Image: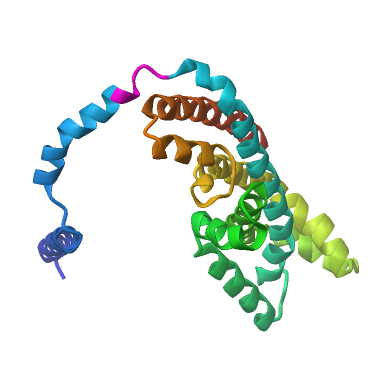
Amino acid sequence: MDAANKKRLKRIKTLLTVICILLLLVGSALVTQVSFTDLWNGLPNMGTLLGEMFPPDWSYFGYVTQPMLETIRMAVLGTTFGGIIAIPVALLSSSNVIRIPVIYQISRFIMNLIRTIPELLLAALFVPIFGIGEIPGIAAITVFSFGIIAKLTFESIEAIDPGPLEAMTAVGANKVQWIFFGVIPQVMAHYMSYFLYSFEINIRAAAILGYVGAGGIGLVLSNALSFFQYNQVLTIIIYTLIVVLIIDAVSNKIREKLL
């Protein structure tokens, strides 16, 4: 095939790809009944809502400090518990650590299954079990963090350098020594980076778990919206934004040092 025909085929593939994407977008818009007219007509209402939010109720900052601390505690505990549980599952899911296909395939299936369930749904499931408060939020974040950290750590383990492992095997190291001195040192920095990344996500997620009764700042936000206290809603948003930005900045610095 000459260069001209290859170029023509490439253009045809690009054109077909663009057409497929456009058809997908148009079809999705029709099925979901997206209407730019409704969006345009709703702009004045959005302006009215923003007008009711300003100025924020700065005195409300003192009231939401305690719920914000609850949210941070939920994220810290949930991420920690999830990170701890993720370690053995990530090891069991790695084919270069566990040579038995049945074991690592089952571990991967469980890990992928858990990752399909969003935090909000998990919290909604745990609230009837544990009642309204921080416990269902911590449980939901634990399960969600486990899915993220286990998946990323397992992929890092699969990509480690096999050289040190082969050398340890040659000198008669047992499986426990093989893992502790050959596998973990190679993935520890990546694991901590994934842990911090998950913590960043969980701070944001914990802020909305209160909508299903999981406590924290989300519960206060839900109450403020229910009573149309939009100036207090803006205060909560600003407070949450400040906390998230600070945590993101600190977490990014730590991850840069690790990697």
Residue 201 drawn at (x, y percent): 53, 44
| In this rendering, position of residue 118 left or right of residue 132 | left
| In this rendering, position of residue 186 left or right of residue 71 | right
| In this rendering, position of residue 231 left or right of residue 97 | left
Residue name at image x 64 percent, y 30 percent: 66
Give the magenta-colored segment's residue range: 52-56
Residue 244 covered by magenta stretch: no
Chief secondary structure of the magenta portion: loop
Residue name at image x 72 percent, y 73 percent: 98
Q: Residue furthest bottom?
A: 102
Quarter of the image with the C terminus in it? top right
Residue 195 drawn at (x, y percent): 64, 46
Q: Quadrant of residue 68?
A: top right
Residue 188 drawn at (x, y percent): 72, 48
Considering depth in this image, is 185 or 81 the residue closer to the camera? 81
Considering depth in this image, is 42 or 199 the residue closer to the camera? 42
Residue 194 drawn at (x, y percent): 61, 47
Q: Quadrant of residue 178?
A: bottom right
Residue 256 is at least partly visible in this image:
no
Above or below: residue 113 compared with residue 187: below
Above or below: residue 211 compared with residue 123: above
Residue name at image x 89 percent, y 66 percent: 173
Considering depth in this image, is 57 or 142 the residue closer to the camera? 57
Quarter of the image with the N terminus in it? bottom left
Q: Quadrant of residue 71?
A: top right
Residue name at image x 56 percent, y 40 percent: 203
**How many numbered tags mark residues here?**
0
Considering depth in this image, is 207 or 226 the residue closer to the camera? 226
